Image: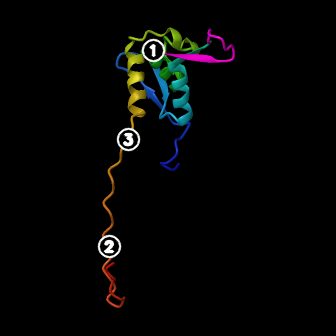
């Protein structure tokens, strides 16, 4: 697959020492995945304005850091397993211990995999040597 496109099937398995459980996450979030995280992060309440115009509405935005972590887990965890997780649906992510080392490691890996990456700018190719048979370049 071209490096310009994400492989939607690529997964990373997250483990921590001395824990027989594992969590599998997306290798990288797509634009759609990022949008879904943003939608879950921000709770939007729309209320009708009280003053005179019943059609007008106002919006209030609420941000939650723990909501961000839960949104990242909901969007990125694709499967899990092990003695404590086998047979449990992924909807149980709502109830996992946020301080569990495996959960913390999964969040770290999600963040690491989705960091903005900058590649070094390649050195420009040197200009080819002028052909002695070609006319001289004009200075403008």
Front residue (pair 25, 69): 69
> Looking at the picture, does residue 67 appear above or below residue 37?
above
Q: Is residue 27 magenta?
A: no
Residue 117 horizontal/vertical position (percent): 38, 41
Q: Identify which residue, 72 or 41, lies in the foreground.
A: 41
The magenta segment is 49-64
Q: Secondary structure at mark 2?
A: loop
Q: Earlier in the sequence, mark 2 or mark 1?
A: 1
- Compared across the picture, whether 131 is left or right of 59 comes to left
Give me the residue at 37% from left, 15% from top. 101
Q: CA distance from mark 2 to mark 1?
A: 54 Å
Q: Residues within 10 Å of mark 2 (few under 14, many from 20)?
A: few
| Front position among marks 2 and 1 | 1
Q: Earlier in the sequence, mark 2 or mark 3?
A: 3
Viewer-side residue, 102 vs 49: 49
Label 1, on which residue? 64
């Amino acid at each position: 697959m071209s490096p310009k496109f994400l492989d939607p099937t690529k997964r990373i398995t997250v483990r921590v020492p001395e824990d027989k459980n594992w969590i599998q996450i997306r290798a990288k979030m797509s634009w759609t995945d990022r949008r879904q995280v943003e939608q879950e992060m921000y709770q939007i309440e729309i209320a009708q304005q009280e003053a005179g115009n019943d059609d007008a509405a106002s919006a209030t935005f609420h941000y939650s850091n723990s909501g961000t972590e839960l949104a990242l887990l909901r969007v990125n965890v694709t499967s899990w397993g092990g003695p404590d997780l086998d047979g449990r649906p992924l909807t149980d992510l709502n109830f996992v211990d946020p301080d569990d080392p495996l959960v913390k490691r999964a969040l770290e890996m999600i963040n690491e995999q989705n960091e903005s990456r900058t590649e070094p700018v390649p050195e420009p190719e040197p200009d080819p040597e002028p052909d002695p048979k070609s006319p001289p370049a004009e200075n403008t």
